[in-house]
Image: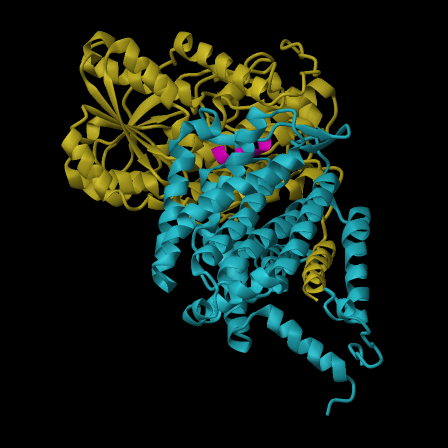
Amino acid sequence: MRLKKVVFGAALAGLAGVSVPASNAVAQDTLFVPLFTYRTGPFANSGIPIANGMHDYFNMLNARDGGIGGVKVVVQECETGYKNEKGVECYDSVKSKNPLVISPYSTGITLALIPKASVDRIPILSMAYGLSASAVGSDFPWIFNPPSTYWDGMSIVLQYIAKKEGGFDKLRGKTIGYIYFDGGYGLEPIPLLDRFATDYGFSVKKYPVPPAQMQNQSGLWLSVRRDRPDWMVMWGWGAMNPTAVQEAAKTGYPMDRFIGIWWSGSDDDARPAGAGAKGYLSLNINAVGAGYPAIRDIVKNVIDKGNSQTPKNQVGENFYNRGVMNSVIIAEAIRHAQKITGKKVISSADMRRGLETLSISDQRWRQLGLPGFAASFAVTCQDHNGHHAAYVQQWDGHKWVKISDWIPPMKEKVLPLVYEAANGYVTKNQPWPKRTEACDDKTL
Amino acid sequence: MLYREVGQYKTSYGADQALFPILQDRIGIAVILLLAFVGVPLTASSFTIDSILIPVLVLSLAATGLNLLTGYTGLLSLGTGGFMGVGAFACYKLTTFFPNVNIIVLILCSGFFAAAIGTVFGLPSLRIKGFYLAVATLAAQFFLSWCFIRVAWLYNYNVSASIEVPTKTLFGLAVTGPTASPVTRYLIVLSIVALLTLMAANLVRGRIGRTWMAVRDMDLAAELIGIRLYQTKLLAFAVSSFYCGVAGAMMVFLWLGNAESESFNINQSFLILFMVIIGGLGSLLGSFLGAALIWGLPIVLRAAPAFFGVSIRSATAEQASFVIVGALIIFFLIVEPRGLARLWQIGKQKLRVWPFPY
């Protein structure tokens, strides 16, 4: 009796599944770019502006230029809620529709998709997040994480701190507090931080924030008050960021000694703490502000026409521009791929070649209508990241202000770690597919 | 009419005690098994298999595990996610220690680790009951998810604190890892789930199941008729955790291919508990129906607008599916508090006399 019922249940599920259309095919003469976004859940505050920026830039290209190389870009959002299961489901739902590139926008989802995408031959662009080791092109031909890895970010943070303290030798005996998202994202920089701590003789206090406790940090900040670290470094995301900034302000921690990674520097991260957030620092890889010609084009062609979900006053905010930058990289890679292959409508394999030969010079940023928007950058066949510079910005109470030059990462410290980690990943995941893709000539 | 048992005489005790005493049930199950083992692999798309069928089967097994504990023995547990995690991490460690052992054997073995941990956390159940036990198992949940991130040995000191699934083959066919085809993984999941469900079905209708139910209905009375509460409750925890552990191992190895501590958090425990409550406490069928409803419905709802040619923003669809699923859960609980399985039972009774009800 029972088994019958049980199997009936399974079959019912089966029928429900079969009746779901697996895909509504995307027209053949378009460029299909799925965007994994999250406008719901505890990470929505970070996810919404990025999703808006990514979406609006493609819509602007479609409206202003008629797409890329005359081919329309079809953008489709898939809501992941920053959950790994949902991200994998989104991936399964788009993979049969010839997606050019996947932007998971979550380190956890990226980790889950890296092996799958390598087999399905779909490029993944995890812009300045994801697995740091995936920068090694010979091991991860389908994964791209420009312009910088978390380890680059940590080395830049420490250089900034060292500069403020008067040199790396002045760090001896100091304490650096590290408040981080207790998951893959926040754990990844720890090996580098620990290595720096032994090299330069400072001590590290770690304050993990479990995902379920993101909005409950008062106990943690009491410990910070007790430990009195000289600097606080944050690897936070979603609701964790504004909570940490507010708690820091409440505890009276000096905000100009509290520095976040580029994912902890949204306007909405600092704003809720009001005047208390003044002085808070974060790294950044893109410029803020709406004064760029390309962004004015977005306002004119997309937002004013009512084709966007973006409130007009949020255009040009940090994470909105981050989303734009993500789309610029995708769009430029598509252009490169079109140029290399001579095809207008490209495949995901062509897209991989486009990404691998990608370089955006200062001049090219200017041509794109985004002069000085980001550091000029390039990826190569060997190096899918480039390990580029970032700058430090400070919250002045209303907006972000750039307060440092572009600081390059300490490659001599980061690269050995990257290669070691890539090696470790490949050995642990044997048999890992050997790279069979040829390297393209960069001069093309 | 459809379920008329007239003329089906049982001439032996064996026939009377069979798992499916009624002919219609036997036909039904044969059709369903045929559909699941042959029909689905031939017709379903890889999205259907990967995102609906495999998850529903895996979650059904976890729900079955919880149902054995909560539905049959009456011990409320909020540690399901943690026990699933034990299975997953145990399986990962086993693949590290015994890389050449058949992965299916390892998945089943990892259930024993979960069973051991489950038994330990089941010890308080001898002293505390009801909501208080729920809180004790909640402690297990928090302790275990803390271990999954703080004990680096469990994930082989991976910098990202996640466990990755290596490619394992069976008769030269990849069964885990990215190269394994969805159909292969589906068939393995289906076989394991079918086998374990058959085991559970026989367990609950035999002596052990009866002692569980006696404890659930009134533990004092059970004790008076000679049931030893100590062994019975701990056995329920062990068996339940075994099922959850196998489900957790399958979740990582045959479904997601990667997991971190967050995959086994308190939300997972609640999700499974909701499946059991909505499906029907004390019913194996209910575990499957509950899993199908809670996992499948949002996917169907999200796909529905596109199916009818309506374009709707993905975030809006997500919010709408939250609202609709929530409303449906309330609706089902009002209409039939004993779950979907009870609805099916009522339906079956009606079918018996249909179309001439008296």
Does residue B341 appear to the left or right of A385 in the view shown? right
Q: Residue at x 39, y 10 (%)?
A: A413
Most foreground residue, A214 or B69: B69
Q: Residue at x 75, y 66 (%)?
A: B20
Give how far across and how far down residue B332 sits, in percent.
Answer: 55, 72
Q: Is residue A108 magenta?
A: yes
Q: Which residues are magenta?
A: A105-113
Vertical arrangement, residue B73 with respect to residue B187, above or below: below
| Quadrant of the rendering where the C terminus of chain B is positioned | bottom right
Q: Residue at x 58, y 35 (%)?
A: A61
Given residues B132 and A219, the one toward you in this image is B132
A147 part of magenta stretch: no
Colour pattern of the rendering: by chain
Task: Measuring from the top left, give residue B39's x and y in whole percent.
Answer: 81, 52
Q: Is residue B228 left or right of residue B199?
A: left
Q: For residue A290, say whether it is visible.
A: no
Q: Quadrant of residue A36?
A: top right
- At 21% across and 16% down in the image, what residue appears? A164
Q: Nearer the viewer, residue A373 or A326?
A: A326
Q: Which residue lies most toward the front here?
A: B226
In the figure, the shade used to draw chain B is: cyan
- The percent coordinates of residue B346 (x first, y second) are 65, 78
- What is the chief secondary structure element of the magenta stretch? helix
User: In the image, is B41 to the left or to the right of A224?
Assistant: right
Of all chains in the rendering, the one displayed in yellow is A
Q: Residue furthest bottom?
A: B358
